[in-house]
Image (cartoon, grey):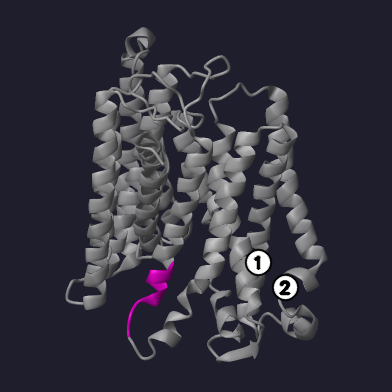
């Protein structure tokens, strides 16, 4: 393998993948911590990963264009990952221990084959990462999208979700574990509250999978090979990764009696899996385009408005949730701080939106920004890295707790890796080296 080929793989595959894995590991660990959880936690992860994707893709000299390099892509990826968090997963980890929980408070369980855990984490992991890729695929700048294309996409998206829900309701024997032997229990949800949660988690997982498959089918119908590869790569790699990780339930047997936060270990490795999926997808689908004949170029004003608003809103909401998490840990009275922080941040968000819109409108000379729509592009990624890692530190917990201290050091280690990689690419962009295509 010659030097140019090694150089190519390092800059197009290895370094981007490491960056996504590092950011995924940090943000997904934070995702389940105080102040976050569900969509709020996935928004925290989504805006960080999406900003990194955009920064790696962006060419400040506009000499080369990658398929998923515009500001609409960062918005779409952020929304997709945030939306994917609107569901739970707490009923499946016990499957890896051979138990199906009926009533946790009463310690009521029944035996269940462990393979159910692998199946449902695979089903869950596909759209949890894949929906971000689905929405990202919608805003490729490789070719124009017609009204007919959007009709196909919307119909398949809605149709996939509806079909999944219909099948779920019609085939409980397929989608509800041990339904045949536990039918009476499933009918008595008042005395089996964990089965109610299991029904809800499985229902949401199948609906999200239906949405994912609907988008995938639409891109197959449109014969957009690049979008199909993007969606399949992200979904399948993360689905397999989450399944194999087994929620780290194996750790309790390996280190018996050892007191550690294994659940957060699972969450951070779940983020690493998601980052791996996006890193490989970046390499396979986001290489610079060879021809500019069919490239869709948005107006610089649209690029700046979309980018600034997406990053501002993502960071503002993450910061609000992070401060709430810090207050929960160190001050208590969660409901008070939840209300107070909304009172503080709503005006900040409204004023911020007004200032961004006003700024972009005042600086709307398209020809002035034609050579570089985002002159301060590097400020975006550095701001996101610094604020998100600051949030990770303040919600981790007191250093007097050695477990929390170890995660604090772990986040710092991941931060230093991300800083080194981002600085390296920033330096290359300053030199005008952004298109490394020497594959011989």
Q: How far apart are marks 2 and 1 (CA)?
A: 7 Å
| Residue bounds of the magenta highlight | 259-266
Outermost residue to the left: 400
Label 2 sits on a secondary structure element that is loop
Q: Nearer the viewer, residue 220 or 70?
A: 220
* Left/right of residue 163 with respect to residue 37 in the rendered view: right
Mark yes or no: residue 247 visible: yes
Residue in the picture at 63% in, 54% down:
208
The numbered dot on residue 430 is: none
Q: Which residue is drawn at 57% across and 79% down?
A: 96
Q: Earlier in the sequence, mark 2 or mark 1?
A: 2
**What residue is disc 1 on?**
202
Q: Is residue 355 above or below residue 74?
A: above
Prevalent SS, magenta region: helix
- Residue 105 belongs to magenta span: no
Q: Is residue 263 magenta?
A: yes
Is mark 2 in CB contact (under 8 Å) with mark 1? yes
Residue in view at x 60 percent, y 44 percent = 231
On the picture, is 391 further left or further right than 249? left
Which residue occupies the foreground of this view, 278 or 120?
Answer: 278
Q: Is residue 49 above or below residue 292?
A: below
Name the mark on residue 176: 2
| Residue 51 showing in the rendered view | no
Q: Residues within 10 Å of mark 2 (few under 14, many from 20)?
A: some
Viewer-closest of 291 and 156: 291
Position of 293 with respect to 175 (left or right) is left
Residue 31, quarter of the rendered image? bottom left
Q: Position of residue 15 (x, y in %)?
A: 35, 45
């Amino acid at each position: 393998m010659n030097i140019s080929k090694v150089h190519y793989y390092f800059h197009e595959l290895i370094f981007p993948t490491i960056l996504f894995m590092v950011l995924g590991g940090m943000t997904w660990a934070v995702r389940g911590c105080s102040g976050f959880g569900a969509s709020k936690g996935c928004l925290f992860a989504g805006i960080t990963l999406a900003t990194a994707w955009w920064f790696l893709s962006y060419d400040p000299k506009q000499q080369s264009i990658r398929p998923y390099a515009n500001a609409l892509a960062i918005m779409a990826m952020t929304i997709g990952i945030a939306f994917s968090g609107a569901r739970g997963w707490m009923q499946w980890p016990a499957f890896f221990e051979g138990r199906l929980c009926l009533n946790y408070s009463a310690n009521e369980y029944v035996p269940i084959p462990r393979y159910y855990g692998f199946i449902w984490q695979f089903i869950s992991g596909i759209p949890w990462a894949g929906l971000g890729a689905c929405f990202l695929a919608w805003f490729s700048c490789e070719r124009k999208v017609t009204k007919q294309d959007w009709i196909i996409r919307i119909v398949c998206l809605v149709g996939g979700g509806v079909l999944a829900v219909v099948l779920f309701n019609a085939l409980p024997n397929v989608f509800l574990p041990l339904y045949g032997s536990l039918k009476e229990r499933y009918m008595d949800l008042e005395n089996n509250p964990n089965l109610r949660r299991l029904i809800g988690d499985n229902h949401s997982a199948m609906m999200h999978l239906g949405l994912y498959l609907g988008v995938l089918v639409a891109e197959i119908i449109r014969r957009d090979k690049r979008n199909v590869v993007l969606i399949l790569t992200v979904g399948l790699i993360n689905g397999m990764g989450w399944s194999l990780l087994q929620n780290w339930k194996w750790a309790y047997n390996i280190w018996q009696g050892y007191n550690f936060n294994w659940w957060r270990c699972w969450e951070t490795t779940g983020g690493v899996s998601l980052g791996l999926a996006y890193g490989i997808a970046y390499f396979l689908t986001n290489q610079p385009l060879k021809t500019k004949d069919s490239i869709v170029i948005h107006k610089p004003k649209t690029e700046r408005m979309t980018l600034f608003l997406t990053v501002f809103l993502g960071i503002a909401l993450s910061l609000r949730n992070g401060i709430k998490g810090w207050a929960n840990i160190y001050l208590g009275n969660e409901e008070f701080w939840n209300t107070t922080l909304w009172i503080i941040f709503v005006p900040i968000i409204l004023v911020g939106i007004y200032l961004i819109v006003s700024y972009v409108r005042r600086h709307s000379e398209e020809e002035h920004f034609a050579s570089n729509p985002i002159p301060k592009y590097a400020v975006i990624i550095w701001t996101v890295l610094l604020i998100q890692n600051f949030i990770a530190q303040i919600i981790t917990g007191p250093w007097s707790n050695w477990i929390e201290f170890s995660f604090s050091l772990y986040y710092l280690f991941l931060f230093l890796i991300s800083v080194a990689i981002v600085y390296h690419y920033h330096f290359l962009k300053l030199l005008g080296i952004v298109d490394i295509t020497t594959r011989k």
